[in-house]
Amino acid sequence: MQNITILGSTGSIGMSTLDVLARHPERYSVYALTAHSRVEQLAEQCLKFKPQVAVVGSADAALRLSRLLQEAPQIEVLHGAEALCQVASAPACDAVMAAIVGAAGLASTLAAAKAGKKVLLANKEALVMSGQLFIDAVKQSGAVLLPIDSEHNAIFQCLPHNYDRSPAALGVEKILLTASGGPFLTRPLDTMDAVTPAQAIAHPKWVMGRKISVDSATMMNKGLEVIEAHWLFGAAASQIEVVIHPQSVIHSMVSYIDGSVLAQLGNPDMRTPIAHALAYPERIASGVGALDLTVIGQLQFSRPDLQRFPCLKLAYDALLAGGSAATILNAANEVAVQAFLDEKIGFGMIAQLIARTMDSLPLCAVTDIEMLLEQDRLARQTVNALIS
Ligand code: NAD
Ligand code: MG
């Protein structure tokens, strides 16, 4: 029996994780569930899954949750950032699904890594912003890091079992990261300024949280994934190639020096990578239907247009620049995306604001978490000043 903490259980990934867990009550129990503000939804989840601990964002939310959980007084209700780290690193917890969105998930995801947990990583921003520090924490504690992002989970499945962040050692030539291209793959470029938040979050293939949906529309999501792939698999920027594949059936590929290309395919449903990582190295049912290629008929591929998707280029630039660049990129993007969702800026401004923030902050080496958080803070301050 494995005892699981889900950080961000009320989100898209959190809910899909609970869906998979509910199919295997003999294998998994829930240690802790956490949510930021959706107290009613968290209460329902708690009554169904009976965690030992539930964590919310504020004292007020904790009070409301306790009232809703009167019939389950054994569930301990906590609140705040420290409590997130506590449930991510508690001795009673075996595995942590890191599914908080954005930098808000860094401390708790890192706490799980430092505590040597099995870390199921959905929160790509945490890895993008902390890079080597995160990988070092995993190595030092002996944590097992398993990717949930569908592309990275696919790559993990296509790599040899004894792969250890060194492509050349096992004949890996390239990582081919597939991308659907999002909702604006073919939209006329001169109409991009008129894009509304509702249009940007209407992804053609995946149903996801709002932030990652906007990131998919700008393709910053793929940019963050390039950086994520660099840290997870030890591949250089030149070894990570983005391929547009609108059907989202091939979730990514690995190309070997002998000319072989291995791919992982499946219906676009996050329960597949979630089930894979939960049960690894075994396999369990996820609730996802079998792939019928004869229904899909055609698989298409093309190269990304960097003029249409400047955010993808900004992410490659940040990876090549190293040091604090990815931290700044990630922070500027989070602020710009929120401003777009709040209708304070147009869609095209997202990339411009990130570029200007990156240009105006000097790069530095990031050797500890305090420096990292300071770079994150400076970038947010800079992009906020540019917006107002
Ligand atoms: P979401 O917006 O649906 O859910 C986010 C979760 O984080 C919620 O439970 C929310 O309560 C919690 N949260 C938000 N702000 C918080 C804060 N300040 N403190 C504590 N908790 C907070 O997001 P999602 O789509 O589930 O994505 C979660 C993560 O997984 C993101 O990093 C995303 O990039 C990654 N991811 C998502 C998908 C997907 O299909 N949804 C696929 C790949 C990767
Ligand atoms: Mg992805």
Image: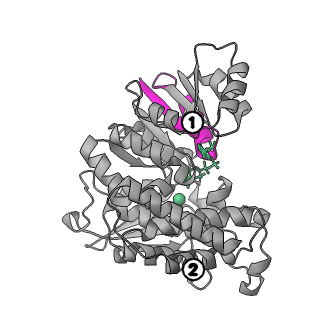
* Coloring applied to the structure: one colour
Instruction: Please provide percent x and percent y for residue 249.
Output: 55, 61
Q: Which residue is at a point 46% across and 45% down the rendered structure image?
A: 107
Whether residue 251 appears in this view of the structure is: no
Give the side of residue 327 with respect to residue 353, left or right.
Answer: left
Residue 306 image offset from top left, x and y in percent: 55, 83
* Residue 220 visible, this orientation: yes
Q: Which residue is mark 2?
A: 356
Report the residue at 43% width, 76% height from top.
362
Q: Which residue is mark 1?
A: 80
Q: CA distance from mark 1 to mark 2?
A: 33 Å
Residue 45, image quadrant: top right
Residue 285, image x and y in percent?
51, 37
Q: Quadrant of the image for the C terminus?
A: bottom right
- Write down the region rendered in magenta: 1-29
- Decide: few, some or many residues near mark 2? Use Cα within 10 Å; few <14, some 14-19, many ≥20: some
